[in-house]
Image (tube, coloured by chain):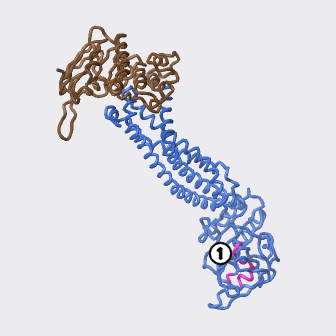
Chain colours: A brown, B blue
C-alpha cells in the first residue's frame, strides 16, 4: 500500500525541521507555526498544550499529513512528506496514522461496525473474515447489537470508542488525538484516556492535543506551543 | 472490489436519505427518456408505415417527359396535361412506343391530368381532373358504388370529394369557372374505392372521365401528362425501365421512368429530418433534467462537506470520493433510464396509435431501438451532470471540510 512506512529504531519516528505554516489572509498573513522543530521517537506519548489559537491543531494537522508546511520538512520514519504526492499522503493516513477527533467524526450514513470496517476495506480491499473488527469493537466495549446502530443513536462515549476502534483497525504506528475527551463527561473521559494509555503501552506513538493539564499528565512528555512556537 | 462496495453503499444511502429530492431528479430523467423515445418511435412508425404503403406500389412505373417531371414525388395534375404547358407531355407516338415495349409486362395506359375549378350547386372548389381511356378504367380503378363512365358526360369521383361536396350517384358537377367562360356539366355515375397516396393516380379527391371528355374541355389530344405501367411482376421493374430509357432516350433524353424507390427515398428523408427535429425538441427536457441532477449533486456535495473531510482524513483517495458522487448520479440516471424505458413503451404505444393510427410496427427493431437509445442518452447525461460535483468534492481541502458544520 502506498504511503506505508516501517519504523526504524535509530531515527525518530516523526521529525519536524523548521516547519512553518502561513495562512495568507486579506488582512495579512497569519503565521500559525513558526519554524517548529520537534523529534518524536517511536512509542512516545506527547501531550501538546497551549492556549486557543496557539497553533496546536495546525501542528496536529501537519503531523496527520492533512496539510503541508509552507516551509520546512516533516519526516515520518525518515521519509520526507514534501516528496510525497497527495496519493501517497492519503495512503500514509490510511496505513500509518490513526486519527481520534474531539467531535468523533463518524460517518452518519454507516453503522458503528461499518465505520470501523471502512478504513479496513480501503486498505485490504476485502471483507474482514478474521473477526478483527468485531474483537476490536468488543475491546472498546461495543457489543454486536450496539455495532449495528448508526452513530447518532449512540452516546458520546460510545461514539468515541467506535472512533478509537476505527483509528486502530489498520494497526497504525501513530495515534493522533485532538481533544479526545473534550466532548465527554469526566468518567467517560477517564475511561477513554485509560484506553489511549494502554494503546501507548502496547507500543503505539501517541500525540495528543489537550487543554486539560490532568489529561496531559497521562503523557510521557508535554510540549507547550504559544504563538506558533514551541516554548 | 469491497472497497468500491462500501463507496457504492454510501452513494445508495445518500440517495435513500434524500428520497424525495432523488425521486424528483429521477422523474426529470424519466420525462426526458420518454420524450426522446416516444418521438423517435413515432417517427420510425410513420416511416415504416409509409414505406409499407409505397412498397405496395412497387409494381407501378410512371413515365414522364424528361424536362417536366424528373426527380420523384407525387404525381400532380397540371404538371404535364394536354392543356398545360407546351412541352411537358408525352406525345402519342412516344406513348405507342412505350406501350409496345411494356404491354407484355402489364397494363400500360396514358393519362391526361389537370387541376380546375368545379362548381356543385352554390359551392365552388378546385379539384384534380383525369382523362383516361374508358377501356382501361375498370382495370385500374375499383368502384364502391355505381358504374364506370360510358359517355363524355359521365364521370366517376373519389370518396373524399364525394364526402366533402355531398355528392352521390346522379349528382351534377360543372367543370370550369362560370365567371370566366362556359362550363362543362358532367354527371357522377360511380364512386371510386379509397386508394390513399399512390404513385400513378391520386383519385381520392379527383374526377375521372374519358379521354374525349378531357380533350373536349382542355384540348391537347395525344399530349399525355404521363404514362403509367402496372406490372404483372414487380421483378420486371428494372428490365422495363431500362428498355424504355434505352429505346426512347437513344439520341436525347426524352423521358424519365420513376418507380416507388425514389419517392420512398424522398419521403423517408423528409420524415427522418422531422423525427430528428422533434427529438431535438424532446432533448430539451433531458437538458432540464440534467440541470436538476447537477443541482441535486451539488446540494449533496454541499451537505456532505464534513463527511468528505472525514473520509479524506481517514485515508480515502480523491478518486474514491469522485467515484462516490459519480455512483450517485449513475444510480439516479440508471433508475431514470429504466423507468423511462418502461414508461416509453406504454406512452409510446398510445402516442403511436394516436398519431400514426396503427401500432403494427411498434415492436419493429427500427422503432424499439429508440428505447435503448433514449436510455443511453438519459444515463450518459445524468453521469456527465455528476462529473463536476464529484470533481469539486474530491478537491475539497480536508481541513476546511472537517471544519464545516
- Of B369 and B388, nearer the camera is B388
User: For the point 61% across and 58% down, which residue is it?
Assistant: B268
Quarter the C terminus of chain B occupies: top left
Magenta residues span B203-220
* Residue B131 seen in this snapshot: no
Taking the image as shown, residue A101 lies to the left or right of residue B274, namely left
Q: Return the x and y of residue A71 as percentages of the image width and height.
A: 21, 26
From what the image shows, is residue B113 above or below residue A208? Answer: below
Taking the image as shown, residue A78 lies to the left or right of residue B51, namely left
Q: Residues within 10 Å of mark 1 (few under 14, many from 20)?
A: many
- Of A176 and A181, nearer the camera is A181
From what the image shows, is residue B390 above or below residue A43? Answer: below
Q: Chain of mark 1?
A: B
| Residue position for label 1 | B77
Find residue A10 and report its image quarter: top left
Secondary structure type for disc 1: loop
User: For the point 35% across and 35% down, which residue is it?
Assistant: B395
Q: Return the x and y of residue A129 as percentages of the image width and height.
A: 53, 17
User: For the point 74% across and 74% down, which residue is it?
Assistant: B159
Q: Report the residue that reaches farthest toward the top.
A: A10
Amino acid at each position: 500500500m502506498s504511503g506505508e512506512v516501517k519504523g526504524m529504531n535509530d531515527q525518530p519516528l516523526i521529525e519536524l525541521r523548521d516547519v512553518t505554516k502561513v495562512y495568507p489572509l486579506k488582512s495579512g498573513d497569519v503565521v500559525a507555526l513558526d519554524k517548529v522543530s520537534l523529534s518524536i521517537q517511536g512509542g512516545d506519548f506527547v501531550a501538546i498544550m497551549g492556549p486557543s489559537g496557539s497553533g496546536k491543531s495546525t501542528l496536529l494537522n501537519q503531523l496527520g499529513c492533512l496539510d503541508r508546511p509552507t516551509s520546512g520538512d516533516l519526516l515520518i520514519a525518515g521519509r520526507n512528506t514534501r516528496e510525497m504526492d497527495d496519493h501517497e499522503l492519503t495512503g500514509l493516513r490510511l496505513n500509518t496514522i490513526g486519527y481520534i477527533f474531539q467531535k468523533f467524526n463518524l460517518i452518519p450514513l454507516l453503522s458503528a461496525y461499518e465505520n470501523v470496517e471502512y478504513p479496513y476495506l480501503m486498505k485490504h480491499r476485502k471483507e474482514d473474515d478474521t473477526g478483527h473488527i468485531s474483537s476490536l469493537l468488543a475491546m472498546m466495549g461495543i457489543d454486536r447489537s450496539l455495532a449495528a446502530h448508526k452513530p447518532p443513536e449512540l452516546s458520546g462515549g460510545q461514539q468515541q470508542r467506535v472512533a478509537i476502534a476505527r483509528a486502530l483497525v489498520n494497526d497504525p504506528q501513530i495515534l493522533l488525538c485532538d481533544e479526545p475527551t473534550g466532548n465527554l463527561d469526566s468518567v467517560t473521559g477517564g475511561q477513554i484516556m485509560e484506553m489511549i494509555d494502554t494503546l501507548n503501552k502496547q507500543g503505539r506513538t501517541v500525540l495528543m492535543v489537550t487543554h486539560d493539564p490532568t489529561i496531559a499528565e497521562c503523557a510521557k512528555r508535554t510540549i507547550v506551543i504559544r504563538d506558533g512556537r514551541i516554548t | 472490489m469491497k472497497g468500491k462496495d462500501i463507496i457504492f453503499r454510501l452513494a445508495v444511502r445518500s440517495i435513500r436519505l434524500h428520497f424525495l429530492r432523488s425521486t424528483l431528479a429521477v422523474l426529470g430523467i424519466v420525462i426526458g427518456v420518454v420524450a426522446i423515445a416516444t418521438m423517435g418511435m413515432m417517427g420510425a412508425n410513420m416511416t415504416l408505415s409509409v414505406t409499407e404503403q409505397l412498397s405496395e406500389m412497387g409494381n407501378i412505373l410512371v413515365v414522364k417527359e424528361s424536362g417536366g417531371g424528373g426527380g420523384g414525388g407525387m404525381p400532380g395534375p397540371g404538371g404535364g396535361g394536354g392543356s398545360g404547358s407546351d412541352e411537358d407531355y408525352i406525345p402519342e407516338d412516344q406513348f405507342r412506343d412505350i406501350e409496345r415495349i411494356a404491354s407484355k409486362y402489364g397494363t400500360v395506359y396514358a393519362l391526361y391530368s389537370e387541376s380546375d375549378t368545379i362548381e356543385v350547386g352554390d359551392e365552388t372548389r378546385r379539384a384534380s381532373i383525369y382523362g383516361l381511356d374508358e377501356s382501361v378504367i375498370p382495370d385500374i380503378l375499383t368502384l364502391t358504388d355505381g358504374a364506370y363512365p360510358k359517355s363524355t358526360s359521365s364521370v366517376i369521383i373519389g370518396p373524399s370529394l364525394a364526402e366533402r361536396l355531398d355528392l352521390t350517384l346522379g349528382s351534377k358537377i360543372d367543370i370550369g369557372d362560370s365567371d370566366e367562360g362556359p362550363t362543362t356539366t358532367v354527371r357522377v355515375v360511380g364512386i371510386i374505392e379509397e386508394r390513399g397516396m399512390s404513385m400513378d393516380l391520386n383519385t381520392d379527391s379527383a374526377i375521372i372521365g374519358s379521354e374525349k371528355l378531357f380533350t373536349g374541355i382542355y384540348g391537347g389530344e395525344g399530349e399525355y401528362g404521363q404514362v403509367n405501367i402496372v406490372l404483372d411482376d414487380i421483378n420486371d421493374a428494372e428490365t422495363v425501365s431500362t428498355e424504355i430509357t434505352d429505346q426512347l432516350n437513344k439520341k436525347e433524353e426524352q423521358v424519365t421512368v420513376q418507380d416507388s424507390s425514389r419517392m420512398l427515398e424522398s419521403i423517408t428523408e423528409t420524415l427522418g429530418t422531422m423525427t430528428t427535429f422533434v427529438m431535438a425538441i424532446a432533448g430539451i427536457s433531458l437538458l432540464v433534467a440534467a440541470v436538476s441532477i447537477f443541482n441535486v449533486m451539488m446540494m449533496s456535495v454541499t451537505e456532505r462537506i464534513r463527511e468528505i473531510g472525514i473520509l479524506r482524513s481517514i485515508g480515502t483517495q480523491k478518486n474514491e470520493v469522485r467515484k462516490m458522487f459519480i455512483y450517485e448520479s449513475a444510480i439516479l440516471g440508471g433508475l431514470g433510464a429504466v423507468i423511462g424505458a418502461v414508461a416509453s413503451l406504454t406512452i409510446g404505444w398510445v402516442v403511436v396509435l394516436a398519431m400514426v393510427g396503427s401500432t403494427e410496427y411498434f415492436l419493429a427493431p427500427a422503432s424499439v431501438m429508440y428505447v435503448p437509445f433514449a436510455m443511453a442518452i438519459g444515463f450518459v447525461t445524468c453521469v456527465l451532470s455528476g462529473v463536476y460535483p464529484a470533481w469539486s468534492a474530491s478537491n475539497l481541502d480536508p481541513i476546511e471540510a472537517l471544519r464545516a458544520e
